[in-house]
Amino acid sequence: MRDRHILGMEVTAPENRPALAAAVELLRGAEGIGLFGIGAPAILAD
């Protein structure tokens, strides 16, 4: 699973990387994280 996340960061446009890093930092402080998806995004939420 970790490899998929690394690949996702590698293929992300360089100008988007700071925003993704900031989002991860916000999530690190969360007590819990809920995800929801329908169709293809359901795989990510799983």
Image: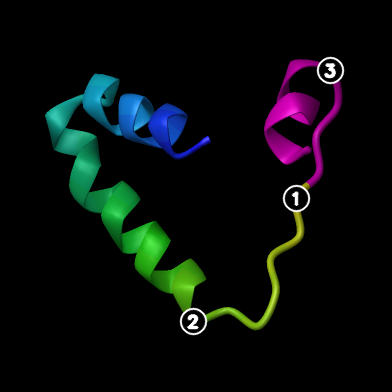
| Sequence-wise first label, 2 or 3 | 2
**Residue kind at label 1, given as amino acid type:** Leu
Residue 27 vs residue 22: left or right? right
Horizontal and vertical percent position of residue 26: 43, 71
Q: CA distance from mark 2 to mark 3?
A: 29 Å
Picture residue at 32% right of the left edge, 34% below the top = 6
Residue 15 location (% of width, % of height) = 14, 35
- Depth order, front residue of 24/6: 6
The disc labelled 3 sits on which kind of residue? Gly
Residue under label 2: 29
For the residues bearing labels 1 and 3, Cβ distance under 8 angstroms: no
x, y percent for residue 19: 28, 51
Relative depth, front residue between 10 and 13: 10
CA neighbours of label 1 inside 10 A, class few (<14), some (14 to 19), many (20+):
few
The image quarter containing residue 34 is bottom right
Task: Tell me the SS state at disc 3.
Answer: loop
Where is the C terminus found, in terms of image quarters? top right
Q: Mark 3 = which residue?
A: 39
Query: Measuring 20% from the left and 50% from the top, which residue is drawn there?
Result: 18
Secondary element under disc 1, as helix, strand or loop, is: loop
Q: Which residue is mark 1?
A: 35
Name the residue at the right extreme: 38
